[in-house]
Amino acid sequence: MHAGARTKMPKGLELLTLGIDLGGSKILTAVVNSRGKMLASYESTTPATKNREAVIQFILDSTWRVLKQASITISEIYAIGIGAAGISNPETGILFTSPNLPRLRDVPLKDIMQERLGKKAFVINDANAAALGEFHFGAARGARNFIYITLSTGIGGSIVIDGKIYTGAIGAAGEVGHMTIDDNGPICNCGNRGCWETLASGTALAREARHRIKEGVRTSILEYAEGDVEKVTAQAIHNAAEQGDSLAKELITRTGYYVGVGLVNLINIFNPELIVIGGGLSNIGDMLLGPAFKVAKERTYKKTFQAVRFASAELGRNSGVLGAAAFALQEMKKPLSK
Ligand SMILES: [Zn+2]
């Protein structure tokens, strides 16, 4: 079945898009207008261990709820944009694999959503969605060549060249978190060693702290982790650092150094005008990013460093859902090719 019929909007009303941010831990759905304003949003926990049909049903339930909340019906929605964690092909709308959703493999998400909801649907990787959100409505407005990175439990990224997301051959480009920083470094989930995210993510920071605490280093970090070394998180380390804990400060500086090493590679390869930095770990701010920018400045060509600007992501946890909606709107405007 083809969901080809475009919705006719009454004059004076703007186009409403349904954005869906399908993450490994949460699903955020929102009704978004063309200026990036969310008219309603609904968030729920992803049923990560459930099978494919249950996850699809869950997404549909979230959709009905958010439509109800916005007091509209699906017929008033122009198109649907889905930002999905994992590797997907934006051309075919197939989600190949998704971290934390192990039972979603090779899912034709675009076709399924179009069939079930009777509207055009578009699928994009979650980091690319977040970058598009920042591009249309946030920190990257007006930029043509920029890189978006999200420092979180892992490191995600998106590369925008000449105003367009660079997706690569099968849609898997922009996996900046898996560039090799240390060829003998820790083993990564992807199978490689010493990926950027094994050294500069929140998970890496917490892992190092646990290691040092087990070695017997004196620190107040445990006070922020219920006294349990296994409960040490990046947040606990940040809290301890703010109270002056020297191990916490040292570990954050070290993580910032590795953030910087990755930035050096990105700046040298892409000569971006802007790097937008988001993700929970980046909320640590100067203590983390100061050392990162210092390394970036020291190890890149002076001219290229002078050409790049760094900005914090502005849309926070809504970047993905807003970007997914913007992607749908953007794809609808393209001339029909099939
Ligand atoms: Zn990796």
Image (cartoon, rainbow, N blue to C red):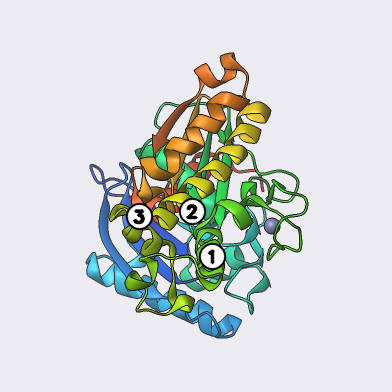
Tell me which amino acid carries mark 3. Answer: Ala
Which residue corresponds to mark 2? 251
Q: Position of residue 262 (x, y in %)?
A: 61, 40
Q: Nearer the viewer, residue 307 or 216?
A: 216
Q: Residue at x 35, y 55 (%)?
A: 241
Q: Residue at x 26, y 72 (%)?
A: 68
- For disc 1, the neighbor class at 10 Å (few under 14, some 14 to 19, many from 20) is some
| Mark 1 vs mark 3, CA separation in Å | 15 Å
Q: Position of residue 191 (x, y in %)?
A: 76, 63
Which residue corresponds to mark 1? 212
Q: If you read the primary sequence from the N terminus, does the residue marked by circle 2 or circle 3 appear first? A: 3
| Mark 1 vs mark 2, CA separation in Å | 10 Å
Q: If you read the primary sequence from the N terminus, does the residue marked by circle 1 or circle 3 appear first? A: 1
Tell me which amino acid carries mark 1. Answer: Arg
Q: Position of residue 308 (x, y in %)?
A: 50, 23
Q: Is residue 325 left or right of residue 185?
A: left
Residue 320 makes an appearance in the image: no
Q: Nearer the viewer, residue 72 or 103?
A: 103
Whether pointer 1 and pointer 3 mark residues with C-beta atoms closer than 8 Å, the reply is no
Q: Is residue 102 left or right of residue 229?
A: right
Q: Is residue 256 left or right of residue 93?
A: left
Whether pointer 1 and pointer 2 mark residues with C-beta atoms closer than 8 Å, the reply is yes
Q: Residue at x 56, y 84 (%)?
A: 49
Q: If you read the primary sequence from the N terminus, does the residue marked by circle 1 or circle 2 appear first? A: 1
Mark 1 secondary-structure assignment: helix
| Mark 2 vs mark 3, CA separation in Å | 9 Å
Which residue corresponds to mark 3? 241
Mark 3 secondary-structure assignment: helix
Q: Position of residue 247 (x, y in %)?
A: 44, 57
Of the 4 image quadrants, the one containing the N terminus is bottom right
